[in-house]
Every structure is written in C-alpha cells, then in structure tokens.
Image (spheres, helix red, strand yellow):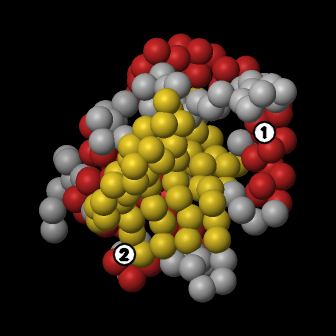
Amino acid sequence: MDGDITLRPIKMRDQRSWREVNRRNREWLRPWEATVPPAPPGHLAQRPTYRQMVRHLRSEATAGRMLPFVIEYQGRLAGQLTVAGITWGSMCSAHVGYWVDQAVAGRGVMPTSVALAVDHCFRHVGLHRVEVCIRPENIPSRRVVEKLGFREEGPRPRYLHIDGAWRDHLVFALTAEEVPEGLLNRWRHTRPGTPQK
C-alpha cells in the first residue's frame, strides 16, 4: 500500500467490480490484451470465465509460479497486476503484466503498483530479476517502466498473441542490485510533484 494505492490478492468476490472495470475499458485495452491463438483442429479455444481465471491464478500461486493481484485506487478496483513465470533455481526471476482503468491513468497508479510488486518480489519472495515485456507501440506502458528506471534489453519477435496476432515486444528488466533502496523509494523521490531534498 502506498497512499491511495493498494495491491492485494485477487478474490472471487472481486468479480462484479473486475468485470465492470474490464467491460468499461474493453476498447482501450484491446490493442494490448493477450488473446487466445487459434486452436488446433479438434480443440476449442475460448477465454476463461472470471471464476475459471481466478481458480487458475490461485492454483499457479499455490504452486509458487505466480502472484496475482488487483490494484485498488481510493478503495475501488482499478486494474490488475500479475507476477508470472516465476522461476527458481539459478534464475530466481519473473515477469510482470498489468492493466489499469483508463479513468485513473496518468495519476501514478501503475508505476506505484509495479514498484510495490517489484519490492515485494525482491524483499519478501526472494527473486533476483523482474522483467516487463511491452509492445513497442504501447507508449503509456513504456512510460511506466521508463519512469521506474527499468533497463531496456531488446526485442522479442512475435512474443505474445495480442489482439488476434503474434506481436513483437520489447524487454525491460531490473535486478535486485539495481534498487538496493527499493523501487518504491526510488519512485517516490523521482516522480513528478515530489519535492527534492
């Protein structure tokens, strides 16, 4: 939690709020949201229901492969952030995906949420590296990682199925050594409107 922004585990009881925010933002999110690629012959490809999605997220969280969160702004559900692809052993890494309600975009909600999640991953979960993969055209999302000081590492051609096709992404990353003071602390000292000491 940081001021008006809270990151907490997603719950079944979030269904009504989640669906309302997602429905209202459908067109705004469409160019950036993952889609299900065409299924091989004999298989059915369909988006999961909210309940199926939450069950899957919880199962992955229980297995230690994922951290599914909702973002609240001023006590209302305002988006989702998922730490996924958690890998242990010699890698200790994960990637972060997120979306936010257009009504609160530009208020620092997403940079603060990403900073909260990264600090949790580094300080409490024990990860060493966190990546964010973004379509090159997604300027608002790129601004989030640039504001937070993520390092651009290069392209991943045809990385994810987004908006009906395989799309190129850019990789941005941070390691724990790059933010010894914590990412949220660094963001607090660099975000616009923060008095400099």
Residue found at the far left of this picture: 196
Q: Position of residue 30 (x, y in %)?
A: 48, 22
On screen, residue 187 versus residue 10, left or right, reads left
69 or 92: nearer the viewer: 92
Q: Quadrant of the C terminus?
A: bottom left
Q: Position of residue 95 (x, y in %)?
A: 53, 59
Q: Position of residue 195 (x, y in %)?
A: 17, 56
Q: Give the mark nearest the N terminus, 2 or 1.
A: 1
The residue at 36%/75% (across/down) is 179
Q: Position of residue 180 (x, y in %)?
A: 38, 81
The residue at 58%/39% (across/down) is 80
Query: From what the image shows, is residue 85 above or below residue 136?
Result: below
Query: From what the image shows, is residue 150 above or below residue 52?
Result: below
Task: Name the element at disc 1.
Answer: helix
Residue at the disc numbered 1: 54
Amino acid type, label 2 = Val
Residue at the disc numbered 2: 179
On screen, residue 187 versus residue 58, left or right, reads left
Task: Name the element at disc 2.
Answer: loop
Amino acid type, label 1 = Val
